[in-house]
Image (cartoon, rainbow, N blue to C red):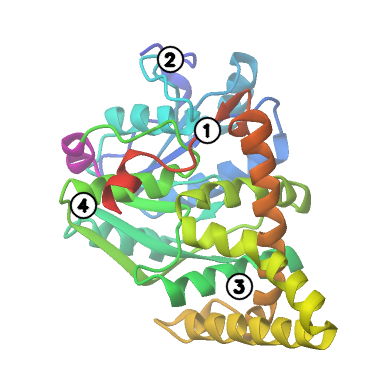
């Protein structure tokens, strides 16, 4: 692999570090404020005895600009060109795993923020498990993040393993043993989990381990709506529910009147709120989610219904979901389907 950044301008992993924090990014332009914020975050991770490795797929001039700010705070590498998955983040992960100097590796999206205590807990869990999937929570909480928080709580109530996470802990030994997972998908984090499960790896679904996730801007959140719905297409019953929901309301209104349709809406809102409340009271989530989040569950149902039709539009008009300069036709991949 060729590195576009001079070796003496970044620090290698500290000998005393217990783990590697692997961040994969790609930026089309340089944002100094973002770079400075990341530098501060990287320094806090290094203070928690975790080496920081950033695999950066940005254009050369953008790569150099970020690298100049991060010098002394992380190891900054380009993506190994041998990896050619459609999802560029997967290429960065495989690059980082190959060159990481520790067996314990924390994989995290760019909106994840670990504390020193989180790093220590993840490192300890990776001494026993080969993959650890924690939970996320949002801070701060604009209204759109509250809807996402309600979704997280519903997943915690509905899915035994808990909500899907934007961060994972893996061991390099296991990652190399199980081999490459499907990298031509949108829902790559969960594809890793399913791939490890298929390979009989030792997995910890840490439902009581909460790691901060920063909410997206409102503009980016809007852009993400059809993507999340598209990722759910493999869950046919769930997708069918959201597709049929407006039809059910229309038929109820047509044949039984608006009062019946209003009653149906009330029952659905109550059921989803109760479901979110169940997710809130399990495994210490009340320390990280406000009670008010459960009342946003009905709004999330409305949002996801609209987004499912939006995703269906992308499916029929483009054959997939736009992802950068590519179109990804698969929300999930081989491991998800094989694991049922």
Residue that label 4 marks = 130
Judge whether residue 173 is colored magenta.
yes
Could one spot residue 182 in this view of the protein? yes
Range shown magenta: 170-178
Q: Secondary structure at mark 4?
A: loop
In the current view of this chain or complex, which residue is farthest to the front? 255
- For the residues labelled 3 and 1, the Cα–Cα distance comes to 28 Å
Judge whether residue 24 is colored magenta.
no
Residue that label 2 marks = 3
In the foreground, 28 or 117: 28
**Mark 1 or mark 2, which has the lower sequence index?**
2
In the foreground, 65 or 156: 156
**Mark 3 or mark 1, which has the lower sequence index?**
3
Measuring from the top left, give residue 27's x and y in whole percent. Answer: 63, 29
Residue that label 3 marks = 150
Tell me: 15 left or right of 108.
left
């Amino acid at each position: 692999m060729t590195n576009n950044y001079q070796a003496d301008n970044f620090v290698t992993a500290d000998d005393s570090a217990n783990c590697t924090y692997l961040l994969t990014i790609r930026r089309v332009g340089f944002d100094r404020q973002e770079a400075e914020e990341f530098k501060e975050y990287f320094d806090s991770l290094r203070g928690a005895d975790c080496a920081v490795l950033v695999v950066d797929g940005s254009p050369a001039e953008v790569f150099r600009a970020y690298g100049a700010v991060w010098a002394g705070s992380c190891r900054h590498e380009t993506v190994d060109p041998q990896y050619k998955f459609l999802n560029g983040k997967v290429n960065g992960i495989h690059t980082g795993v190959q060159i990481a100097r520790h067996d314990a590796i924390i994989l995290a999206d760019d909106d994840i923020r670990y504390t020193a205590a989180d790093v220590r807990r993840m490192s300890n869990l990776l001494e026993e498990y080969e993959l650890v999937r924690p939970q996320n929570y949002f801070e701060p909480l604009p209204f759109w993040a509250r809807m996402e928080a309600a979704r997280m709580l519903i997943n915690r109530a509905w899915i035994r393993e808990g909500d899907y996470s934007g961060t994972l802990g893996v061991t390099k030994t296991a990652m190399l043993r199980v081999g490459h997972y499907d990298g031509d998908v949108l829902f790559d984090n969960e594809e890793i989990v399913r791939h490890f499960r298929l390979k009989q790896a030792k997995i910890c679904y840490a439902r009581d381990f909460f790691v901060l996730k920063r909410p997206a801007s409102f503009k980016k959140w809007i852009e993400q709506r059809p993507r999340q719905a598209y990722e759910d297409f493999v869950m046919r019953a769930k997708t069918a529910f959201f597709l049929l929901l407006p039809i059910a309301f229309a038929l109820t209104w047509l044949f039984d009147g608006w009062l019946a349709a209003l009653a149906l809406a009330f029952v659905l809102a109550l059921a989803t709120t109760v479901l979110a409340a169940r997710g809130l009271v399990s495994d210490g989530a009340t320390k990280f989610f406000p009670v008010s989040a459960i009342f946003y569950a009905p709004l999330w149902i409305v949002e996801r219904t609209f987004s499912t039709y939006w995703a269906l539009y992308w499916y029929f008009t483009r054959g997939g979901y736009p992802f950068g300069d590519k179109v990804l036709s698969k929300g999930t991949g081989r491991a998800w389907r094989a694991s049922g």
